[in-house]
Amino acid sequence: MKTLLAWILWLWIALVIVGALWWAPPLPGFQAGPDSSRIVYFHVPMAWTSFVAFLAAGVFSALYLKRREPRRDAAATAAVQLGLAFGLLALVSGMIWAKIEWGEFWNFDPRQTTIVLALLFYTAYLVLRLAVADHETRRRLAAGYAVFGLVVAPFLFFVAPRVLGASLHPEPVINAERELKMDPAVLWVLLSGSAAFTALFFWMHSLQCRLAAIARRNGLEA
């Protein structure tokens, strides 16, 4: 059953790639040409999945503080690691697009700045784990830090970019007038891509948790 689900996931991702490159129309209003917008179909889902991963880390950490089960701590750590991976991919893809569209890899755009801050915040989570030798103390401190991230992550991903002022990024899917201004095919690919990458995260997360369980049984916990 798991093998079948894995194949379905890879087919789903393949269809998203086909839809992004050939089916969905290019977005208008891009200086470097409409086809330069196609990176958005990957950049946005990766950023979204990074956010989901960081929220998952906070939830698993809260469960650890409640039940003190090591597997919850391992699940939180895996979620942070994967969140950083997806976040870094979102940052790099965004910088490539920025170079094409705005002429520079880095423009101090509010969304560029806040995603870097989010990555630094969760990198500090991993550094904290490395700095504490005692297992119980490390788990407790890391869990508290990740639970605090349940406030930090939404602020950095959604609130701060709007507070910091005008962005070079295109309008959100839902604009200030609460109206949907997006071609249905574009919206379908974006939503499908976000869902596919989110499913990919949970699949990779389950694999990491299984590896962590094996490590604990063999006394090799990091």
Image (cartoon, grey):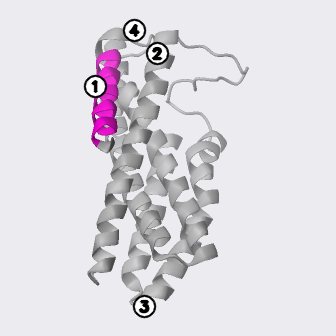
| Residue 164 percent location from the top left of the image | 62, 44
Residue at image point 44% right, 40% down: 198
Give the mark, 1 or 4, whose residue is nearer the N terminus.
1
Give the Cα distance between marks 3 and 1: 44 Å
Q: What amino acid type should be assigned to the residue bearing mark 3?
A: Asp
Name the element at disc 3. loop
* Residue stretch rendered in magenta on the structure: 3-20
User: Which residue is denoted by mark 2 in the rendering?
Assistant: 186
Labelled pair 4, 2 in contact (Cβ < 8 Å): yes
Name the element at disc 1. helix
Q: Closer to us: mark 2 or mark 1?
A: 1
Give the Cα distance between marks 4 and 2: 7 Å
Q: Closer to us: mark 2 or mark 3?
A: 3
Query: Does the magenta-highlighted stretch encompass residue 132?
Result: no
Labelled pair 3, 1 in contact (Cβ < 8 Å): no
Give the Cα distance between marks 4 and 3: 54 Å
Name the element at disc 4. loop
Q: What amino acid type should be assigned to the residue bearing mark 2?
A: Val
Q: Quadrant of residue 209?
A: bottom left
User: Which residue is denoted by mark 1 in the rendering?
Assistant: 14
Q: Is residue 129 left or right of residue 208?
A: right
User: Which residue is denoted by mark 3 in the rendering?
Assistant: 134
Labelled pair 2, 1 in contact (Cβ < 8 Å): no
